[in-house]
Image (tube, rainbow, N blue to C red):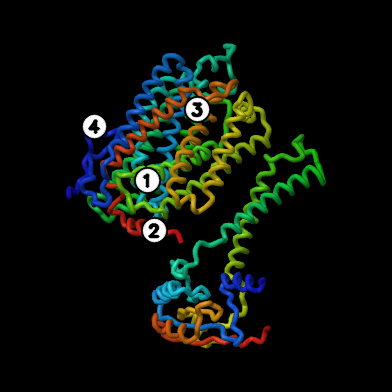
């Protein structure tokens, strides 16, 4: 057994910073065959992104908005996974150890997302109204005193600096947590658990602040006149909600041939289901808090945002969001039996992924097409293309290391975990 | 018929009825929680249904060992929550739009937007009260009188005693065979319990 964690080649560093260690995994935890699980999504993803590139040449404005929706969707997964890992370490969680490697694999999506953000930076002029110079010239007919007042924050150089800071924070923490965990697989060093907790204690407030500001910059500033201080929490709720669904879905997929059989049991699925259920309510709570305060305050500069989402067909999207993002998942997942059945949980996990995308689409797209609600085919191709590539990279990483943190001191508790 | 049903319901709350001859059941003591746990499994497998275990602290997994199945408290909580939901809607609508309509900064007399917090809080309140009340009811609590208190030995249950009680109302109960069975599974002490109360 080699006991040193080696970096991978610079070419694959973006996908997985470490060379494979699966050979040192115990046989129960060693990933089996199933290379189709990463090749197929990656291929579909690349094909759909190529199709989207054709769409860009036809309608660049639509492409940029659709791309932003798909990219923010993938970002919400990565952010959610990072939060998941941080919180498991900080709470000394035992139940989740068997699925932690999946979330660790998910959180190394950040470097890839940074590369995939290039079209957004190129399309900033189309996406972000505040990038237009003539808004700030008092002599110009387009002069906007409100945006002029926000200019010290909403300007391109500062936006790029902030974006760099977010990704430095996210990538550093993800790298640190991922490397500690994979190193523990090899060496079993006893001080790693404490180090992970320390990194998490420093990391959680940093990720909380960067996630909030990231959501303001990437999603809220698409409509630069509008503001909502709870928006960062809203994005967190959506991220954390989605990541539990995706972890459950990946575990179910891996159990179809790759591994984790008899390791992830109905007990763990029930806990993931509980979190999915709980954060369904949390998301609705936050979404409603934002809506109710704006409704009650009744200030035109705030209500206009909802006005846009309650007319020209967008009211159907708003209603669908209430029903399919809250009411249906609530009633499906309220029972114990549903959380313990893989088929129902897998169905709901896919449902969650679709609804999270629909939620972000509802936030972003009315800015581009305020007067006709529609789901453009580019929105679908960009979303599934980006998610395909991201998902493929996650499955690729999972196959290169032990499927669970095999030397984690809490692993045996996690394996024996039961809901009483 | 009704007496039969109430007897059955009460037995699910561990409230068992004494036999005509006042025999309440057999009490057996075990030396430690592990013994009690395995004894409960054996009593369950033997086919007894009217039995209960008593220990100074909760024993993990005992519900499974006794074959109790999942708790029904969740359903009571759900009913409580739905009652609270309906109460909240009714309260907001009736006070705001029917009984005492007041125009406050041009807002509608009744609308869901400002009413949701009240509806939500009442849903949570009723669900929580339902959960607590349901827990008490399904456990048959509070229960100030229990024929087991006639046993001197049983007093140690709040200190270091681990007891299993098979009720005389069980269909399989037969005093000699039940005592023999309890001896067979390792009870360190066995006592017949007679209900000396003068009710009925």
Closer to the N terminus: mark 2 or mark 3? 3
Marks 2 & 1, CB-CB < 8 Å contact: no
Mark pair 2, 3: CA separation: 49 Å
Residue that carries the numbered disc 1 in the rendered image: A251
Closer to the N terminus: mark 4 or mark 2? 4
Q: Quadrant of residue A248?
A: top left
Residue that carries the numbered disc 3 in the rendered image: A153
Mark in the foreground, 3 or 4: 4
Label 4 environment density (alpha carbons within 10 Å; few <14, some 14–19, many ≥20)? few
Closer to the N terminus: mark 1 or mark 4? 4
Marks 3 & 4, CB-CB < 8 Å contact: no
Chain letter of mark 3 equals A
- In this rendering, the answer to whether A189 lies above or below A250 is below
Residue that carries the numbered disc 2 in the rendered image: A417
Marks 2 & 3, CB-CB < 8 Å contact: no
Residue A148 appears anywhere in the view: no
Label 1 environment density (alpha carbons within 10 Å; few <14, some 14–19, many ≥20)? many
Residue that carries the numbered disc 4 in the rendered image: A10
Chain letter of mark 1 equals A
Residue A338 appears anywhere in the view: yes
Q: Position of residue B157 (x, y in %)?
A: 49, 80
- Which residue is at 43% across, 43% downward? A346
Q: Position of residue A365 (x, y in %)?
A: 53, 25
């Amino acid at each position: 057994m080699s006991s040193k964690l080696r970096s991978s080649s610079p070419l694959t560093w973006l996908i997985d910073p470490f060379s494979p260690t699966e050979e040192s995994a115990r046989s129960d935890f060693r990933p089996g065959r199933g290379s189709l699980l990463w090749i197929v999504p990656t291929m579909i993803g690349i094909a759909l992104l190529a199709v989207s590139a054709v769409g860009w040449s036809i309608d660049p404005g639509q492409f940029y908005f659709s791309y932003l929706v798909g990219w923010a969707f993938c970002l919400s997964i990565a952010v959610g996974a990072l939060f998941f890992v941080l919180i498991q370490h900080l709470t000394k969680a035992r139940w989740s150890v068997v699925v932690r490697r999946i979330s660790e694999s998910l959180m190394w999506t950040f470097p890839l997302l940074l590369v995939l953000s290039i079209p957004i930076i190129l399309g900033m002029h189309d996406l972000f109204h505040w990038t237009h110079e003539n808004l700030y010239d008092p002599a110009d007919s387009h002069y906007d005193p409100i945006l002029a007042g926000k200019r010290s924050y909403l300007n391109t150089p500062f936006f790029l600096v902030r974006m760099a800071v977010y990704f430095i924070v996210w990538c550093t923490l993800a790298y640190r947590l991922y490397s500690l965990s994979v190193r523990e697989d090899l060496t079993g060093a006893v001080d790693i658990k404490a180090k992970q907790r320390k990194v998490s204690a420093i990391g959680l407030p940093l990720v909380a602040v960067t996630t909030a500001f990231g959501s303001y910059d990437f999603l809220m500033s698409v409509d630069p006149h509008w503001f909502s201080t709870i928006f960062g929490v809203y994005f967190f709720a959506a991220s954390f909600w989605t990541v539990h669904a995706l972890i459950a879905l990946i575990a179910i997929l891996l159990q179809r041939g790759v591994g984790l059989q008899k390791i992830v049991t109905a007990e763990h699925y029930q806990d993931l289901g509980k979190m999915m259920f709980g954060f369904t309510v949390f998301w609705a709570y936050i979404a409603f808090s934002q809506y109710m305060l704006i409704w009650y305050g009744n200030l035109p500069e705030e209500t206009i945002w909802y006005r846009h989402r309650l007319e020209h067909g967008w009211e159907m999207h708003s209603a669908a969001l209430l029903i399919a993002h809250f009411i249906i998942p609530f009633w499906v997942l309220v029972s114990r039996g549903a959380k313990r059945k893989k088929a129902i949980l897998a169905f709901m996990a896919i449902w969650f992924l679709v609804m999270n995308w629909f939620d972000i689409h509802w936030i972003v797209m009315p800015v581009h097409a305020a007067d006709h609600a529609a789901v453009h085919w580019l929105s679908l191709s960009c979303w599934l293309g980006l998610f395909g590539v991201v998902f493929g990279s996650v499955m690729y990483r999972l196959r290169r290391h032990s499927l669970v943190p095999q030397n984690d001191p809490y692993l045996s508790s996690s394996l024996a975990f039961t809901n009483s | 018929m009704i007496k039969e049903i109430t007897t059955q319901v009460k037995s699910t709350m561990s409230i068992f009825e004494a036999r005509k001859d006042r025999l309440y059941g057999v009490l057996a003591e075990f030396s430690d929680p592990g013994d009690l746990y395995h004894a409960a499994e054996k009593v369950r497998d033997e086919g007894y249904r009217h039995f209960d275990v008593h220990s100074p602290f909760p024993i993990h997994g005992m519900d499974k060992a006794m074959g109790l199945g999942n708790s029904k408290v969740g359903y009571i909580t759900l009913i409580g929550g739905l009652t609270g939901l309906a109460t909240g809607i009714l309260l907001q609508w009736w006070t705001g739009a029917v009984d005492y309509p007041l125009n406050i900064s041009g807002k509608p007399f009744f609308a869901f937007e400002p009413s949701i917090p009240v509806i939500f809080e009442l849903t949570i309140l009723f669900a929580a009260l339902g959960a607590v009340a349901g827990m008490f009811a399904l456990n048959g609590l509070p229960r100030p009188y229990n024929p087991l208190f006639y046993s001197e030995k049983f007093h140690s249950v709040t200190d270091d005693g681990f007891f299993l009680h098979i009720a005389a109302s069980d269909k399989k109960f037969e005093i000699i065979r039940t005592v023999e069975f309890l001896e067979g599974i390792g009870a360190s002490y066995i006592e017949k319990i007679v209900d000396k109360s003068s009710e009925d």
